[in-house]
Image (tube, rainbow, N blue to C red):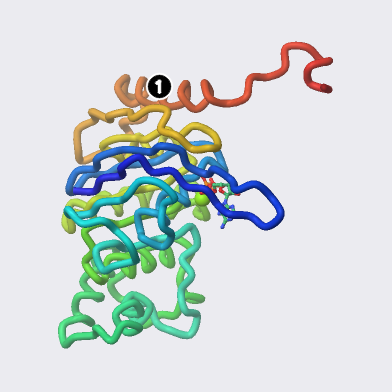
Amino acid sequence: MLQLERLSHWFEREDEEPLLALSDVSIDIDDREFVAIVGASGCGKSTLLRLIAGLIAPTVGRVVLNGRAVREPGPDVGLVFQHPTLLPWASAIDNVLFPLDMLGEIRSDSRARAAHLLSLVGLSGFETRRPAELSGGMQQRVAICRGLIRNPDVLLMDEPFGALDALTREEVGLQLLDLWTTQPKTIVFVTHSVSEAVMLADRVVVMSPRPGRIADIVPIPLPRPRSFDMEGDDVFKSCARRIRDRIFGHAPRPARRASEALS
Ligand SMILES: Nc1ncnc2c1ncn2[C@@H]1O[C@H](COP(=O)(O)OP(=O)(O)OP(=O)(O)O)[C@@H](O)[C@H]1O
Ligand SMILES: [Mg+2]
């Protein structure tokens, strides 16, 4: 459904060599699959999402969505970022409707659809509230609804819960899973949290440090529906261990002697 074919990406830089951010990344992602991506800061996770979204073009390789090469941003892909970036003067429901409004795509049933999405993430009754009247977790749920309003086939999420406290993060994560069950989508979800990746995903892609390559793809055979009780489960622990070993295996080794550290 979504194929990444041998993607490599160099960023051109002024007065410097181009920077190789991603190298030879290939993966086939199934329809309605939930894929998490983890890896060190700077390994190219956001770059990968921008390539999938068609916001930038790969230097080498291609992204194929539903049989067609992605060349520009399209309605098949929704995006959610680390910060909700809502319009401060607009109500929750108007923020959800914003992408349709901007593109002149508001139809007679759009408002009902936005209200329905908000109800699915527990925000019924908050439709007319402005962002300042909502908690961080609520704002991020509004941003998720905004990412879904055009009913995309693929939802790309770049550390969407990174700015939330641990409890809210778990709560919104489980809500995302509920939402994904009722509105099935292909989700590509970037996170720095190994346990969040294992809890949510069908497969976890582990990236090596820059230039980002796929170091491992770890299937998560935990049953659904998932719950945070599963963290004590042996399957959960062994998946998390494999992911951590992979991340650590690609981290720079600590210096063996002080002289090495200083050199
Ligand atoms: N527009 C750009 N021009 C030049 N270099 C860039 C550009 N965007 C990203 N980079 C570089 O490409 C590399 C990958 O960046 P990217 O933002 O994809 O990493 P990331 O894995 O998302 O990191 P983080 O976990 O910190 O968000 C980094 O070294 C970054 O400095
Ligand atoms: Mg990033």
- Badge 1: residue crowd in 10 Å (few <14, some 14–19, many ≥20): some
* Along the line of sight, the residue nearer the viewer: 131 or 35: 35
Q: Amino acid at mark 1?
A: Arg
Query: In the displayed structure, would residue 95 be above or below residue 19?
Result: below
For residue 40, side relative to residue 262 (left or right): left
* Along the line of sight, the residue nearer the viewer: 261 or 135: 261
Q: Position of residue 29 (x, y in %)?
A: 24, 42
Residue at (38, 27) in percent of width and height:
216
Query: In the displayed structure, would residue 213 be above or below residue 144?
Result: above
Q: Which residue is mark 1?
A: 242
Q: Position of residue 199 (x, y in %)?
A: 33, 37
Query: Which quarter of the rendering shows the C terminus?
Result: top right
Hey, which residue is sitting farthest top in the picture?
257
Residue at (47, 42) in percent of width and height:
22
Quarter of the view holding residue 24: top left
* Along the line of sight, the residue nearer the viewer: 233 or 6: 6
For residue 201, side relative to residue 210 (left or right): left
For residue 67, side relative to residue 244 (left or right): left
Q: Is mark 1 within 8 Å of ligand 1?
A: no
